[in-house]
Amino acid sequence: MDHDVIVIGGNFAGLSAAMQLARARRTVLVLDTNAPRNRFAATSHGFPGQDGQGPAELGAALRAELAAYPTVAFASEAAVAARREGGGFVVSLATGGGVAARRLVLAYGVRDTLPELPGLAERWGVSVLHCPYCHGYELDRQPVGVLARTEMAFHQAMLLPDWGPTTLFTQGAFVPTEDQRRALVSRGATVETTHVTSLIGPLPKLEAVRLTDGRTIPLSGLFVAPLTLPSSDLANQLGCAMRDGPTGPYLEVDAMQATTVPGVFAAGDLASPMPNATLATAAGVLAGGAAHRSLVFDRDLAAAA
């Protein structure tokens, strides 16, 4: 085998997994395409000890720490295929050739699909947002909106009044029940059934949204739950089971981040219905430790095939 473990994905989850393995003096290859999901955000908030730091700077610091371990290697390569072979796995690379390892950690994340509204994608990660805990405080209690895509918007609209006066734009995506309307009113939220047609303001800031009837409603932030899909089909190629989450499918893992395929572990947004940098990091720690224990206690992976 070329390596003990190949980690596919080099953001918070993947780097955290690699760190545990590096400290166990295991040979690790981290494959990464340098296009993390959080690249659109200027800062990362709610991350203990790192609040307000830039995601790119955090990633660079983690990679620098890992580079100090002689058993870790990095490659800016895309993994396009993965298969079980004997007591390990072979990963094919987009540039040709392949690499082999005894275990895999999948941490390549998910990709977001946003509503098609003029000016929305250009503001993603700055004034069009998905997580109030990550970005709500910086909006400084100014008016905010929720753009509905599913009934999940009700949950967002119930939370957001703690960050600012809130308007729920139903967009025809769902009709709040009377109980839901009463709950929203009790939180001071407004329900708007007229559709949003565009976003207004100097990019990437948001000043207002325009409705189909010509009205404009001032907003400093618009929250939307993106629909998500895994960034790669490697898990499907390997036969890993999936689950349905509130925004899209995610990998099924156990309490130690093991997938349903022996020898394959997963962490981060790919393997959780709750996207969050801190949770992704913690899951990476678990996945790396579990992969190491698998190398020790499940040495004959071929017998588990």
Image (cartoon, rainbow, N blue to C red):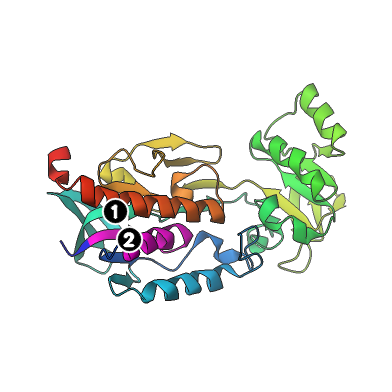
Residue at the top extreme? 178
Which badge, 2 or 1, comes first in the chain's sequence? 2
Q: Does the magenta stretch include residue 254?
A: no
Left or right: residue 209 versus residue 283 is: right
**Quadrant placement of the C terminus:** top left
- Tell me the residue that label 1 is attached to: 292
Amino acid at the residue labelled 1: His
SS class, disc 1: helix
* Between 189 and 162, the one nearer to me in the picture: 162
Tell me where residue 75 appears, x and y as whole percent: 32, 71
Q: Kindly identify the residue that appears in the image at 86 percent across and 51 percent down.
A: 217
**Quadrant placement of the N terminus:** bottom left
* Between 103 and 275, the one nearer to me in the picture: 103
Q: How many marks?
A: 2
Mark 2 in CB contact with mark 1 (< 8 angstroms): yes
Please say if 15 is above or below 76. Answer: above
**Residue 108: in sight, yes or no?**
yes
Please say if 69 is above or below 46. Answer: below
Res 169 → quadrant: top right
Query: Which region shows up in magenta?
Result: 4-23
**Residue 212: in sight, yes or no?**
no
- Mark drawn on residue 21: 2
- Mark drawn on residue 272: none
Amino acid at the residue labelled 2: Leu
| Dominant secondary structure, magenta | helix
Tell me where residue 186 appears, x and y as whole percent: 86, 32
